[in-house]
């Protein structure tokens, strides 16, 4: 039996519904509290700063953590499915755009799976068809971000989105038409999304004096789409919590750590914890589940409602009237961000109808 998984970026649903967090859950088969990635830009005790989890880089730094000699896999709290490739004994390949192969998050989530680059999605699909025809047993993954990228700047309601989806459907059917009958019979197609998106109607100004105030009264601040992670030193919450609730107002909700912790998923059990040597976090990640989640997720978490988004740059300083602007965003708890399509069907079904 072969399996082909097309992860069309746009289904395990953790919080936040953000790429770094959700893709890690899908490919490792673990919730955030166990795979170790609880957001997009979040605090990590090593290197002692907020880290962009897609780039695996401290914002503003000139080099990625991997280039600086940091093994980002040390952040994993438990081996995921793709880290247990040898014991599973299943052949696997994963294809992605050549610009992101072996960079950033791909250093963490794909385990021992060989990564295969492509220049164009049609080339990637062609390679997938060849692999599935030639391999006897295993799976091939393909990562595409066209729908996600288009949705961010044009929303999911535009005619262009329909054209993009139809193009992908036709491309998949063309790939299947080039496969052998035996490979089609033995292959299962799975299409999964890591999150949905919410159209932006109103923006909260998270720049200028507001950001200056937050930086002056917190240990650190991270942003995951429509989620704000706030990290505090002792004594800061008494002042920051009422300020943040007033700032967010009716546009969302500010959660205390105790309220939001459970959304990261069930904790490690004793069996898993006993075998972990997490050199990437202070205390080797064994100081207690709640302590670890607090350090990673934040002491306070602000989650915006549907239609709202943070505005992190002063709009008066935009360089061109034709710059691409975010029209849709994700990261929060609206129904269209949390509930996304998942399709599982025989590969041969692509040639029917």
Image (spheres, rainbow, N blue to C red):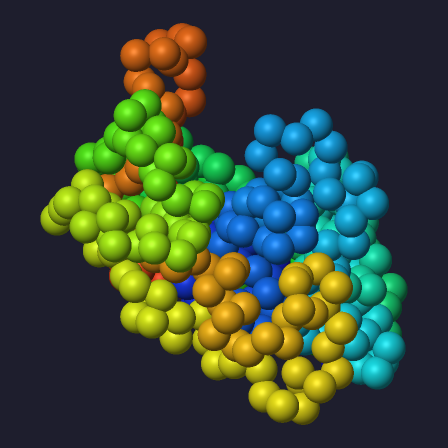
Instruction: Residue at 66% x, 83% y: name it.
Output: 273
Q: Is residue 103 left or right of residue 189?
A: right
Q: Which residue is farthest left?
A: 250
The answer to whether one can see residue 332 in this image is no
Instruction: Tell me the quadrant of the picture where the N terminus can be found.
Output: bottom right
Tell me the quarter of the picture where residue 98 sits: top right
Looking at the image, residue 245 sits to the left or right of residue 343; the answer is: left
Q: Can you see residue 150?
A: yes
All told, the count of numbered labels is 0
Residue 9 screen position, x and y as percent: 52, 51
Task: Name the one closer to the observer, 172 or 110.
Answer: 110
| Residue appearing at x 43%, y 53% in the figure | 233
Question: Which residue corresponds to the image point at 45% horizontal and 70% vertical from the top-left?
Answer: 264
Residue name at image x 66 percent, y 69 percent: 283
Q: Position of residue 59 (x, y in %)?
A: 58, 34
Rendered view: 69 above or below 288 = above
- Horizontal side of residue 344 vs 299, given as left or right: right
Q: Camera-side residue: 44 or 26?
A: 44
Residue found at the far top of this picture: 320
Can you give x and y, in whole percent of width and height, for residue 65 in the image?
A: 73, 43
The quadrant in which residue 150 appears is top left
**Residue 345, x across and y down, in percent:** 55, 73
Instruction: Return the residue found at the far bottom.
Output: 271
């Amino acid at each position: 039996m072969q399996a082909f998984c097309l992860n069309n970026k746009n289904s395990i649903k953790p919080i936040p519904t953000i790429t770094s967090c959700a893709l890690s859950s899908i490919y490792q088969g673990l919730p955030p509290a166990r795979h170790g990635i609880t957001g997009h830009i979040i605090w990590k005790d090593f290197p002692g700063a907020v880290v962009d989890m897609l780039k695996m880089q401290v914002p503003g730094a000139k080099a990625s953590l991997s280039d600086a000699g940091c093994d980002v896999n040390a952040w994993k709290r438990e081996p995921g499915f793709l880290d247990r490739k040898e014991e599973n004994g299943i052949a696997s390949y994963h294809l992605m755009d050549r610009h992101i192969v072996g960079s950033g998050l791909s250093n963490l989530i794909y385990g021992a799976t060989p990564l295969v680059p492509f220049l164009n999605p049609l080339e990637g699909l062609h390679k997938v068809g060849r692999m599935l025809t030639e391999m006897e047993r295993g799976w091939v993954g393909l990562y595409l971000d066209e729908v996600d990228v288009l949705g961010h700047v044009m929303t999911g309601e535009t005619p262009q989105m329909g054209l993009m989806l139809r193009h992908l459907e036709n491309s998949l059917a063309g790939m299947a038409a080039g496969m052998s009958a035996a490979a089609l019979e033995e292959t299962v197609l799975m299409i999964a999304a890591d999150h949905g998106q919410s159209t932006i109607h109103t923006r909260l100004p998270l720049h200028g004096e507001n950001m200056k105030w937050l930086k002056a009264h917190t240990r650190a601040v991270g942003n995951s789409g429509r989620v704000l992670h706030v990290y505090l030193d002792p004594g800061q919450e008494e002042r920051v919590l009422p300020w943040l609730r007033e700032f967010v107002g009716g546009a969302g909700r500010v959660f205390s750590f105790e309220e939001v912790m459970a959304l990261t998923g069930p904790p490690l059990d004793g069996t898993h914890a006993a075998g972990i040597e997490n050199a990437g976090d202070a205390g080797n990640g064994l100081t207690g589940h709640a302590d670890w989640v607090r350090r990673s997720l934040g002491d306070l978490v602000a989650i915006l409602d549907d239609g709202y988004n943070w505005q992190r740059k002063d709009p008066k300083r935009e360089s061109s009237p034709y710059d691409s602007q975010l029209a849709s965003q994700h990261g929060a708890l609206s129904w269209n961000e949390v509930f996304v399509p998942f399709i599982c069907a025989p590969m041969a079904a692509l040639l029917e109808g």
